[in-house]
Image (cartoon, helix red, strand yellow):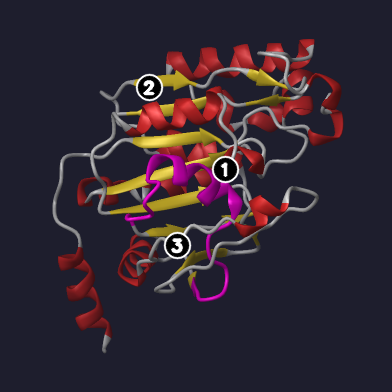
Amino acid sequence: MNTLNDLHKMSSSFSNTEKMPVLFLGHGSPMNAIEENQFVTGFRNLAKTLPQPNAILCISAHWFTKGTKVTAMEMPRTIHDFGGFPQELFEMQYPANGSPELALETKQLLSPLEVELDEHWGLDHGAWSVIKHLYPEANVPVIQLSIDYTKSGQYHFELAQKLSALRTKGILIVGSGNIVHNLRLVDYHNFDKDNYGYDWAIEAKETVNNYLLEGNFQPLIDFEKQSKAFRLAIPTPEHYLPLLYTLGLKGKSEELSLFNDKLLAGSLSMTSVKIM
């Protein structure tokens, strides 16, 4: 099939729709895939408010690459990219279809950026462990877009803006990570304590939330220039950058709301964002 035919096929693959919401999901522990807790309930409650998508494009913290890639296989594998958890979690499968057509359309939208059509990755737990609560029947195709670790926050924010046309093709765009994410400082003895965070985590969460609700995104884009609390909350950027993809897609008249907005184990936050 030549490129013109490819483009025709993809343009007719997804019908025009009302503008889809955009999400950032605080995915937390892989155990959220199989546990019942308040955050899982939050994801399920969210699902009740969403239009049925034609497909999902997920930007997960767990696909951090040099350069930009998009999954382009028909049937992505379920990746168990973690260790030390119960066998039940390793047996979990999320057999959603992929969408080579959406992968190609994403590649075209991001042009002239070179985007590799990837046939090897699949769905990592940043994607499937939360999407399974939105669409438990795995009846919505899912692709992933990787995060280029060589680029700045501003770059990722602006790259996201190029994806905006997908929102009127029934594509639900999901960023998946955690805004406050410092695994080295997790207080495992207080993992089940409700809304428990260190002082710096409380400060970082409240500061980020204020910027989000004010629509003041530039300090969030320039996260590396912010306070010591930010540096502790974001010691490495991979779990934070998916948030910038979500924010880059916000329209001027759209509302931003928060849910699952709690701290966990001292140094993690589950704060999630819906834009529509």
Q: Residue 4 lies in what quarter of the image?
A: bottom left
Percent from the top left, x then y, of residue 82? 73, 53
Residue labelled with disc 1: 33
Give the class, few, some or many, for how many residues have Cα within 10 Å of label 2's Cα (few <14, many ≥20).
some
SS at badge 3:
loop
Q: What amino acid type is highlighted by mark number 1?
A: Ala
Give the class, few, some or many, for how many residues have Cα within 10 Å of label 1's Cα (few <14, many ≥20).
some
Q: What amino acid type is highlighted by mark number 2?
A: Leu
Q: Are marks 3 and 2 in contact (CB under 8 Å)?
A: no
Sequence order check, earlier mark of 2 and 1: 1
Describe residue 87's horizontal placement relative to residue 71 as left or right.
Answer: right
Q: Is residue 53 visible?
A: yes
Q: State the separation of the CA atoms marked 3 and 1.
A: 14 Å
Q: What amino acid type is highlighted by mark number 3?
A: Pro
Residue labelled with disc 3: 95
Residues drawn in magenta? 117-140
Q: State the separation of the CA atoms marked 2 and 1.
A: 26 Å
Q: Residue furthest bottom?
A: 1
| Residue 120 painted magenta | yes
- Label 2 or label 1, whichever lies nearer to me, is 1
- In this view, the residue in front, 167 or 253, is 167
Quarter of the image with the C terminus in it: top left
Sequence order check, earlier mark of 3 and 2: 3
Residue labelled with disc 2: 256
Q: State the separation of the CA atoms marked 3 and 2.
A: 31 Å
Task: Note whether 203 is above or below 180 in the view shown.
Answer: above
Describe residue 265's horizontal placement relative to residue 10 as left or right.
Answer: right
